[in-house]
Image (cartoon, rainbow, N blue to C red):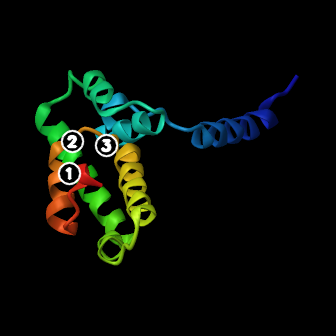
Amino acid sequence: MNFKWLIWPLIAVLLLLSASAPLAQSPSSVSIYSIWIRLSLRGFNQEEIESLLRNMDPKNIDGVKQQLRNTVISNLEAKNVRERFLTSRDSDDLKSIRTSIETELRFAGLQNDEEIKRIIKNRFGIPYNRL
């Protein structure tokens, strides 16, 4: 039996399969930022996330927190939180603003971050703890 005609198509199929198979990511290639976001979207609060990431470099964790703070601030700016606060007329308006802020903090996993609350107060003029 002569199987020489099968060798080239078999090699071509193997090459196509090996090229199309997704490569597994090594744990080091996954960023701490994406881990933090995934955990926060799964419902973990800030303390739980920090506890899970306690073996990571503290400088990297601080960098991720700063990125998250910047994201929260830009999202609140996009929602015109300052203008909504300045033009609020009743408690329902203030409740809506508080809900927007709480939602952003929860999605970023920064519910208990005092730094972001200070930034919100300075940037938007909103004393978050008094809403």
User: CA–CA distance between discs 3 and 1?
Assistant: 20 Å
How crowded is the residue under tag 3: few (<14 C-alpha within 10 Å), some, or many (20+)?
Answer: some
Q: Earlier in the sequence, mark 3 or mark 2?
A: 3
Residue 6 relative to residue 80: left or right: right
Residue ID for mark 3:
33
Do the CB atoms of the residues marked 2 and 1 lie less than 8 Å apart?
Answer: yes
Residue 37 relative to residue 42: left or right: left
User: Extreme left residue here?
Assistant: 59
What SS does tag 1 mark? helix
Residue ID for mark 1:
117
Residue shown at 11% from the left, 38% from the top = 59
Q: Mark 2: which amino acid? A: Asp
User: CA–CA distance between discs 2 and 1?
Assistant: 7 Å
Residue 30 in sight here: no
**Percent coordinates x, y for residue 73 in the rendering:** 27, 61
Q: Does residue 73 sit above or below 5 in this rendering?
A: below
Q: Mark 3: which amino acid? A: Tyr
Residue 22 relative to residue 25: left or right: right
How crowded is the residue under tag 2: few (<14 C-alpha within 10 Å), some, or many (20+)?
Answer: some
Residue shown at 71% from the left, 39% from the top = 13
**Percent coordinates x, y for residue 53 in the rendering:** 26, 26
Residue shown at 29% from the left, 72% from the top = 82
Q: Nearer the viewer, mark 3 or mark 1?
A: 1
Residue 40 relative to residue 46: left or right: right
Q: In which quadrant is the N terminus drawn?
A: top right
Which disc number belongs to residue 113?
2
* Camera-side residue of 61 and 119: 119
**Percent coordinates x, y for residue 4 in the rendering:** 78, 32
What SS does tag 2 mark? loop
Q: In which quadrant is the C terminus drawn?
A: bottom left
